[in-house]
């Protein structure tokens, strides 16, 4: 039987390969190697920009950067093996957005360090990544956080985890033009093996929740499609949430209880009401899901995940047929077949589903999902399995530049 899902290349192996690429390209081994993971959100979707809770974990997929000082003081040469492209960044002039666009995430992080008063040296960098780009698993935060972790080592300027995550978020806002929440950068910085991170986006406080049961695995299935309306869809949802909060006379939907929202139903536009109902319900479900994991109440966790998906599909309207089909297949396999729960994850309109499954039945579950999805959509899904992984790390730490 061919493998039903991709395996993850261990971080040490990705780093070792990258080290060889670096040496081939620049004629010496790297001095520093830093890595940061992608993430998957177990539950709590479209709650981050509503001051709500999210519940992500780091995945065993990383962006890895290897670097050494360059001979030229004000030049950064940053090679991306994934795209086989190199960005040249000039430090002698103010850093501005430019080509190639993917380097804007890095430029934003460089500027973040400059604003802290750090003088950046010339660098030669090689980068590899096992996070799918644009697949909803936050390759963008992995890129920012890996870059920031490298720069901490290079400059000797250590950042507190929250400050580091916020610097990376700011980079994405200002330099990549994406008004993202704080989830992706927080989890890529703060992830811990065998733990999920319950993150309160209002207070920015975090709570690590253990998921240590080795019999459980997280299965991520990529629909491998992305529907076009995403750009406008996201901004529109955000605006509708703000409208709902204003209508309720509250600073954000975090402050709205289900009862208060119901009482105001007749005063709200029906679409805006449904958007708010998703957010208010999802915030509640996220807190309950963390509790369910703590109590090992898997049937409850499953119910919450399916309810989250239905709410995203019907009230928030950010799902799509391919995601719905994947969740339907998983739900049909059900507890009896080893599936605890399943839902779409990420912004929606394509991307991935996340499922919690029994590790011992993975091959069987993955095989069924793959075959059924192909039969019903004519599309080839990508599947991989992960346990909650570590946040950003230095894989190889040389001395800081002077
Ligand atoms: P996601 O974060 O879900 O993967 P985004 O659209 O937020 O999707 O970010 C994807 C973009 O980030 C890519 O199109 C690319 O510009 C940039 N990016 C992320 N990782 C890398 C990488 N390893 N090499 C080059 N560009 C990358
Ligand atoms: Mg992203």
Image (tube, rainbow, N blue to C red):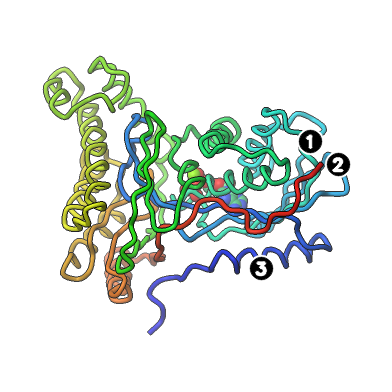
Q: Is residue 102 left or right of residue 186?
A: right
Say if residue 236 shows up in the picture: no
Precedes in sequence: disc 3 or disc 1: 3
Indicate which label's residue lies in the foreground, 1 or 2.
2
Mark 3, residue position: 17
Q: Is label 1 in a helix, a strand or a loop? A: loop
Mark 1, residue position: 91
Residue placed farthest to the right in the image?
71
Residue 41 image offset from top left, x and y in percent: 37, 49
Task: Quadrant for residue 229, please give it.
Answer: top left
Q: Is label 2 in a helix, a strand or a loop? A: loop
Q: CA distance from mark 3 to mark 1?
A: 29 Å
Precedes in sequence: disc 1 or disc 2: 2
Look at the numbered discs 1 and 2 and tell me whether their residues touch, using CB distance below 8 Å: yes
Say if residue 12 shows up in the picture: yes
Asked whether mark 2 and ligand 1 are closer than 8 Å, the reply comes as no
Residue depicted at 34% across the width and 38% down the height:
46
Label 2: how many Cα within 10 Å (few below 14, some 14–19, many 20+): some
């Amino acid at each position: 039987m061919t493998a039903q899902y991709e395996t993850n290349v261990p971080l040490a192996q990705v780093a070792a390969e990258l080290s060889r690429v670096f040496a081939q390209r620049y004629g010496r081994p790297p001095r520093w190697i830093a890595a940061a993971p992608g993430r998957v959100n177990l539950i709590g979707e479209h709650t981050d920009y509503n001051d709500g809770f999210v519940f992500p974990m780091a995945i065993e997929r990383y962006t890895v950067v290897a670097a050494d000082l360059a001979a030229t003081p004000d030049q950064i040469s940053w090679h991306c093996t994934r795209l086989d492209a190199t960005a040249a960044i000039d430090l002698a002039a103010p850093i501005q957005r430019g080509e190639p666009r993917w380097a804007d995430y890095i430029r934003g992080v460089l500027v973040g360090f400059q604003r802290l008063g750090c003088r950046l040296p010339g660098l030669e960098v090689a980068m590899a990544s096992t996070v799918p780009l644009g697949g909803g698993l936050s390759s963008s935060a992995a890129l920012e956080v890996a870059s920031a972790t490298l720069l901490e080592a290079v400059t000797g300027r250590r950042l507190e985890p929250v400050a580091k995550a916020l610097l990376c978020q700011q980079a994405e806002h200002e330099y990549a033009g994406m008004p993202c929440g704080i989830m992706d950068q927080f989890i890529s910085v703060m992830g811990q093996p065998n733990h999920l991170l319950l993150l309160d986006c209002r207070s920015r406080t975090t709570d690590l929740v253990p998921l240590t049961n080795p019999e459980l695995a997280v299965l991520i299935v990529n629909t491998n499609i992305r529907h076009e309306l995403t750009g406008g869809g996201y901004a529109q949802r955000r605006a509708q949430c703000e409208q709902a909060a204003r209508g309720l006379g509250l600073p954000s939907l975090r402050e709205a209880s289900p009862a208060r929202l119901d009482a105001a139903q007749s005063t709200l536009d029906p679409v805006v009401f449904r958007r708010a109902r998703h957010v208010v319900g999802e915030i509640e479900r996220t807190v309950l899901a963390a509790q369910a994991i703590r109590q090992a109440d898997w049937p409850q966790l499953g119910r919450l995940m399916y309810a989250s998906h239905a709410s995203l599909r019907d009230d928030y309207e950010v799902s799509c047929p391919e995601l719905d089909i994947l969740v339907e297949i998983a739900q049909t396999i059900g507890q009896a077949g080893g599936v605890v729960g399943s839902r779409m994850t990420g912004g929606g309109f394509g991307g991935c589903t996340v499922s919690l499954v029994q590790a011992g039945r993975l091959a069987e579950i993955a095989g069924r999902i793959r075959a059924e999805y192909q039969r019903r959509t004519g599309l080839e899904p990508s599947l991989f399995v992960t346990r909650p992984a570590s946040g950003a790390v230095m894989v190889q730490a040389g001395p800081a530049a002077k």
